[in-house]
Amino acid sequence: MALGEKERRLVRLFAACVIGRFDEVARLRRAAPAGEPDRAWRETLLQVHVFAGFPRLVEAYGVLANEGGLGALAPEEILGESDQHVRGRELFERIYQNDSDKIRAMLVAGHPDFAAFIEGHAYGRILARPGLEPSMRELLACAALAVLGQERQLASHVRGAIRCGASSAAVMQTIEAIADLADLAGDDRAESARTIAAHFSARESGA
């Protein structure tokens, strides 16, 4: 699996929203080809708050609305559901595998309600939603964590992307797609992300 042009747009859109590069968000919307924005764009936007908080997502919606919006929602996109702990736990364990219990314990140590929020909301309601494949959602996570300079979590989600079906090539292409945004967000973030992505994707895929 290599990143196509659409997937490159999505990871770049996501990273730009996460670090507040709303000029780039607007540019991407203006440059969107026929047929986009579509559900993939809308699902990508919904995921922003998991990595950057509600204020960034609210601002992104406003910027995109000014540039023409995100298209019409299909009825099946509106789930109207509460936290999904079973679905979230399944995805959490798929991503973290043997480290799941250790990571869950770390989250509980921070606050038990936070751990439940992560599993039921972040993983259950958002990352396990239909509309984007888990592999693509994990590549979005890699893009966000690279531009944020969150190296330990980036390593975890590089492994998660491979475990969800992404290729090592797709992981590296994701980092390259947002490298300029990463460097604008902090010194040498792109190079650090390249090193982490190359190491952990190769190790996870057995290359």
Image (cartoon, rainbow, N blue to C red):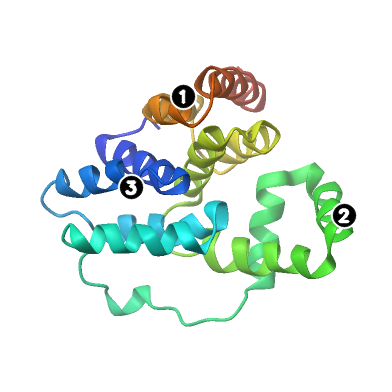
Foreground mark, 1 or 2? 1
**Quadrant into which the C terminus falls:** top right
Q: Which residue is the site of mark 1?
A: 183
At 63% from the left edge and 73% from the top edge, which residue is drawn? Answer: 84
Determine whether label 3 and label 1 are within 8 Å by CB: no
Task: Give the crowd class for mark 1: few <14, some 14-19, many >=20 residues within 10 Å.
Answer: some
Compared with residue 124, is residue 180 higher up or lower down, i.e. above or below? Answer: above
167 over 134 or under it: above or below: above
The answer to whether one can see residue 95 in this image is yes
For label 2, count other residues whose C-alpha is less than 10 Å away and answer few (under 14), some (14-19) or many (20+): few
Element class at badge 2: helix
Name the spot of residue 117 as percent of width and height, x first: 69, 68
Tell me the residue at 35%/57% (across/down).
60
Nearer-N-terminus badge (1/2): 2
Please report contact status of discs 2 and 3: CB closer than 8 Å, yes or no. Answer: no
**Placement of 171 over or under 153, stated as above or below:** above
**SS for callout 1:** helix
Position of 35 with respect to 143 (left or right) is: left
Kind of residue indicated by mark 1: Asp
Nearest to the observer: residue 188 or residue 131: 188
Q: Amino acid at mark 3?
A: Phe
Count of numbered marks? 3
Mark number displayed over residue 105: 2
Identify the residue at horizontal 70%, vertical 33% (top origin): 152
Mark 1 or mark 3, which is nearer the start of the sequence?
3
Q: Pointer 3: residues within 10 angstroms few (<14), some, or many (20+)?
A: some
- The label number, if any, that marks residue 151 in the structure image: none
Location of the N terminus (image quadrant): top left
